Image (cartoon, rainbow, N blue to C red):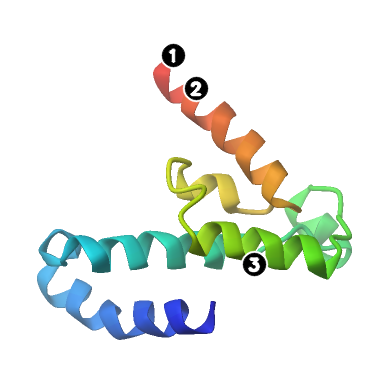
Amino acid sequence: VKLILQRYKDLQDIIAILCLDELSDEDKLVVARARKVQRFLSQPFFVAEQFTGLKGVLVPIEDTIRGFNAIMDGEVDEYPEAAFNLVGTLEDAIEKGKKLMEAAKA
């Protein structure tokens, strides 16, 4: 996870100068997965309930690691980045992703 976030940070200057479309397919994949990891880090914490309006969730570290591994392995590439924002578990992200994709079709 650290490596992909560092690679994304390295690519940000290139993206700012050339734009995302100029990256190789591999680098585009790195960017997409890194952004999902960043969103997945924004789990709904109890202390943030008053700011987010979302109920806090306690997620076991094993579930969080499993979620990061799935993102890194490309198991959830088909879901939009927004699905990973303010969710507790990977299953929550997948459910949110399915809803977002259905809403986009409508």
| Place of residue 83 in the rendered image (x, y in percent of width and height, measured from the top left) | 56, 44
For residue 18, what is the image quadrant?
A: bottom left
Q: From the viewer's perspective, tell me whether residue 87 is left or right of residue 72.
A: right
Q: Which sits in the foreground, 89 or 49?
A: 89
Q: Amino acid at mark 1?
A: Ala
At label 3, which amino acid type do we have? Leu
Q: Residue at x 38, y 59 (%)?
A: 32
Viewer-side residue, 44 vs 5:
5
Where's residue 13, x and y in %? 23, 82
Q: Name the amino acid, label 2.
A: Ala
Q: Which mark is residue 103?
A: 2
Q: CA distance from mark 2 to mark 1?
A: 5 Å
Q: Nearer the viewer, residue 103 or 65?
A: 65
Quarter of the picture containing the N terminus is bottom right
Q: Which mark is residue 41?
A: 3
The answer to whether marks 2 and 1 mark residues whose Cβ atoms lie closer than 8 Å is yes
Mark 3–mark 1 distance (CA, rounded to whole Å)? 29 Å
**Secondary structure state at the residue bearing disc 1:** loop
Callout 3: SS: loop
Q: Is residue 83 left or right of residue 92?
A: left
Residue 58 against residue 61 in the figure, above or below: above
Front in this rendered view, residue 47 or 79: 79
- How dense is the environment of label 2, judged by Cα within 10 Å: few (below 14), some, or many (20 and up)? few
Question: In what quadrant of the picture does the C terminus appear?
Answer: top left
Whether residue 9 sits left or right of residue 76 in the image: it is: left
Q: What residue is rendered at 56% in x and 30% in y? A: 98
- Mark sitting earlier along the chain (3/1): 3
Q: Which residue is mark 1?
A: 106
Q: Residue at x 10, y 64 (%)?
A: 22
Residue 23, given in percent of the width and then of the height, sits at 16, 67
